[in-house]
Image: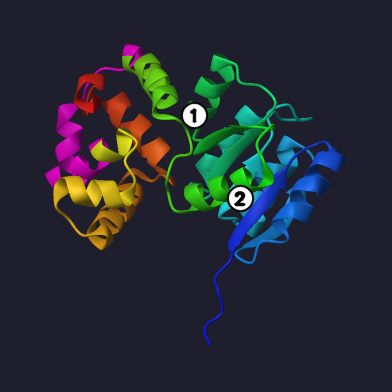
């Protein structure tokens, strides 16, 4: 009988009691394994390089290197690791900075253990766990900073892949994308995987932000 491939998770949290609480809950999940724990941002970066986790649960306020800087370095050195922020703060500037740094999702520490587990599974599948309205706020900010580069689209994504990415940007799940574009769910999964590889990202959130920065589609396309 085949062994279940578990999601490898690294915990980056400087408060020991919080880290222990998260670890104890995640240890009960059959499809998740904790491969390491970091107490500061520098340690989180180094452990990610060494252990190559699927998901890094990242706090913002940490010693030596904060969550924003740690996320940037992790995504540069290990782009396939998805960073899931778990923070006590919901300030816009933190959300914007972390998503620009490459975080795949952003949760507050008042979430339940089961919500955290669901989020880990979602970002591991490449799905965002942010509400579409939050993504749109970030995208609007990035649009102001960037000039469109339509020619880059032709070099990276074909029309079918771009259609899937647009649908994902509107918050549709794989089944809904498949239904809307008259595709099979397997085809949607394959196209998303190709998109992630071409853009060198690990999640839909990163892919959408990359597309918006390049001017491949606008907020009007998502309405």
In the image as oriented, which residue stretches furthest toward the bottom?
A: 1
Q: Earlier in the sequence, mark 2 or mark 1?
A: 1
Q: Quadrant of the C terminus?
A: top left
Q: Residue at x 39, y 29 (%)?
A: 132
* Image coloring type: rainbow
Query: Looking at the image, can residue 102 be seen?
Result: yes
Classify 10 Å Cα crowding around label 1: few (below 14), some (14-19), many (20 and above): many
* Residue 35 on image: x %, y %: 70, 59
In the image as oriented, which residue stretches furthest toward the top?
A: 144
Q: Residue at x 54, y 23 (%)?
A: 95
Q: Which residue is mark 2?
A: 117
Residue 51 occupies quadrant: bottom right
Above or below residue 42? Residue 142 is above
* Residue 124 on image: x %, y %: 49, 52
Query: Looking at the image, can residue 158 be seen?
Result: no
Classify 10 Å Cα crowding around label 2: few (below 14), some (14-19), many (20 and above): some
* Residue 7 on image: x %, y %: 58, 60
**Foreground: 127 or 100?**
127
Going by the image, does 119 lie left or right of 112?
left
Which element carries disc 2, helix, strand or loop? Answer: helix
Point out the stretch of residues depicted in magenta.
144-166
In the image as oriented, which residue stretches furthest toward the right?
A: 17
Task: Determine which of the numbered discs, if any, sits on residue 67 in the image.
Answer: none
Q: Which residue is mark 1?
A: 99
**Foreground: 75 or 186?**
186
Magenta highlight on residue 83:
no
Disc 2/disc 1 C-alpha distance (Å):
20 Å
Please tell me whether mark 2 or mark 1 is closer to you in this view: 2
Above or below residue 163? Residue 35 is below
Above or below residue 100? Residue 180 is below
The count of marks equals: 2
């Amino acid at each position: 009988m085949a062994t279940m491939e578990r999601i490898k998770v690294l915990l980056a949290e400087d408060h020991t009691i919080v880290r222990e609480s998260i670890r104890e809950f995640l240890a009960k999940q059959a499809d998740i394994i904790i491969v390491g724990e970091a107490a500061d941002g520098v340690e989180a970066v180094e452990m990610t390089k060494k252990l190559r986790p699927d998901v890094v649960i990242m706090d913002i306020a940490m010693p030596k290197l904060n969550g924003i800087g740690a996320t940037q370095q992790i995504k540069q050195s290990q782009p396939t690791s998805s960073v899931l922020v778990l923070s006590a703060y919901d300030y816009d500037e933190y959300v914007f900075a972390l998503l620009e740094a490459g975080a795949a999702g952003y949760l507050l520490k008042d979430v339940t253990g089961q919500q955290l587990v669901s989020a880990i599974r979602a970002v591991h599948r490449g799905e965002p766990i942010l509400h579409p309205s939050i993504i749109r706020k970030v995208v609007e900010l990035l649009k102001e900073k960037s000039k469109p580069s339509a020619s880059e689209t032709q070099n990276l994504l074909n029309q079918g892949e771009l259609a899937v990415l647009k649908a994902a940007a509107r918050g549709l799940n794989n089944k809904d994308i498949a239904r809307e574009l008259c595709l099979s769910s397997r085809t949607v999964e394959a196209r998303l995987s190709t998109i992630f590889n071409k853009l060198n990202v690990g999640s839909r959130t990163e892919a959408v932000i990359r597309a918006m920065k390049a001017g491949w589609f606008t907020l009007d396309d998502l309405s």
